[in-house]
Amino acid sequence: MLTANSYEEMEEIVGDLEEGRIIMEKLKELGLDDKFGMYYDAEIVHKKELNSARKEGANNEKKSIAKAMLKAGESISKVMNYTGLKKKDIKTLM
């Protein structure tokens, strides 16, 4: 439940559980508290930064693999299939 990204998602997880509904109401009340909201917002920003860094790292890894494949003489279509990169992105690596 605490891994949900929205109240709607949390409601889906909780379903008809009374205890879950009580916890959700308390979380909504906390969301209205400025001090808690500040910490919550900071946590959301931190999660987004981590996700962005992970995506960037994964993309760099794909580009590294693509470069190695191109150096080994593989075709652009094969590099596209193996890395998931777009043709225009692969061409910039050549």
Image (tube, helix red, strand yellow):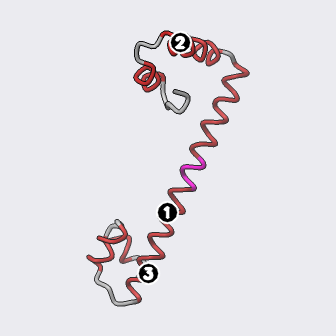
Is 76 one of the magenta-colored residues?
A: no
Is 51 one of the magenta-colored residues?
A: yes
**Disc 3 on helix, strand or loop?**
helix
Earlier in the chain: of badge 2 and badge 1, it is: 2
Foreground label between 2 and 1? 2
User: Which kind of residue does numbered mark 1 sit on?
Assistant: Ala
Between residue 13 and residue 74, name the one nearer to us: 13
Seen at 70% across and 22% down, the residue is 36
Is 62 drawn above or below residue 73 in the view shown?
above
Seen at 48% across and 22% down, the residue is 7
**Disc 1 residue crowd, few under 14, some 14–19, many 20+, Cα 10 Å:** few
Is 93 drawn above or below residue 60 in the view shown?
below
User: Which kind of residue does numbered mark 2 sit on?
Assistant: Glu
Q: How far apart are marks 2 and 1 (CA)?
A: 39 Å
- Which stretch is magenta? 49-53
Is 57 drawn above or below residue 32 in the view shown?
below
Where residue 19 is drawn, which disc sits there?
Answer: 2
